[in-house]
Image: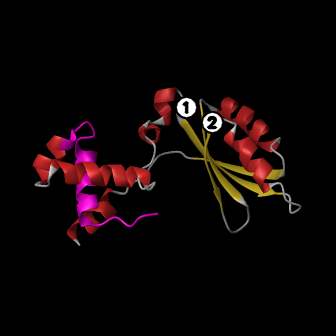
Amino acid sequence: MPTLDATDARILLALDDDPQASTMALSTRLGLARNTVHARLRRLEAEGALGAPSRRVEAAALDRGLLAFMTLSLSQRGGGEGAAAALAAIPEVVEVLATTGEGDLLARVVARDTADLYRITEQVLTAPGVERASTVIALVEVVPMRLAPLLAQRARS
């Protein structure tokens, strides 16, 4: 993963302010050459520093307004790869992380309502190697996922 420098951070903050900005508009706004902005954006994409555009979509816009987190315990006899593939095949499982602590995996799940969450939980429990799931429902997003404060800090460095 590349390390972003101050110029990269400034470009990304400008894109946060105006996601539809052209390379020329960004270069004018930031006082950088158009080729510099273009090359840096392409490099950041190629090196994996920028996530897929679909990550900007809110799940509620897809009629999936309920957010839950599932802590999954896996069989100690392996099955992690099979579990990961099975979880990835469930569209409502939008993120899975390997963790330390009580569980082995943490899954971010979106659903229409609690009945839909129950259906999804049943699917998750059929994944190879998944022995147990503990689910918590998010009530309100207090601080949304954000990186702009870190980008601003980097832009000043």
Residue drawn 23% across and 58% down?
Answer: 10
Furthest residue toward bottom: 157
How packed is label 2: few (under 14 Cα within 10 Å), some, or many (20 or more)? many
The image quadrant of residue 157 is: bottom left
Q: Picture coordinates of residue 14 (x, y %)?
A: 22, 49
**Which residue corresponds to mark 2?**
92
Q: Would residue 88 appear left or right of 66 to someone viewing this image?
A: right
Q: Which residues are magenta?
A: 1-23
Q: Is 48 in the magenta?
A: no
Q: Does the residue at mark 2 contact the one at mark 1 (Cβ under 8 Å)? A: yes
Looking at the image, residue 28 sits to the left or right of residue 139; the answer is left
Looking at the picture, tell me which residue is in the foreground, 72 or 41.
Answer: 41
Q: Secondary structure at mark 1?
A: loop
Left or right of 146 in this view: 6: left
Q: Residue at x 29, y 67 (%)?
A: 5
> Relative to 77, does residue 109 appear above or below in the rendering?
above
| In-front residue for pair 82/100 | 82
- Residue annotated with mark 1: 64
The residue drawn where x is 74% and y is 54% is 72
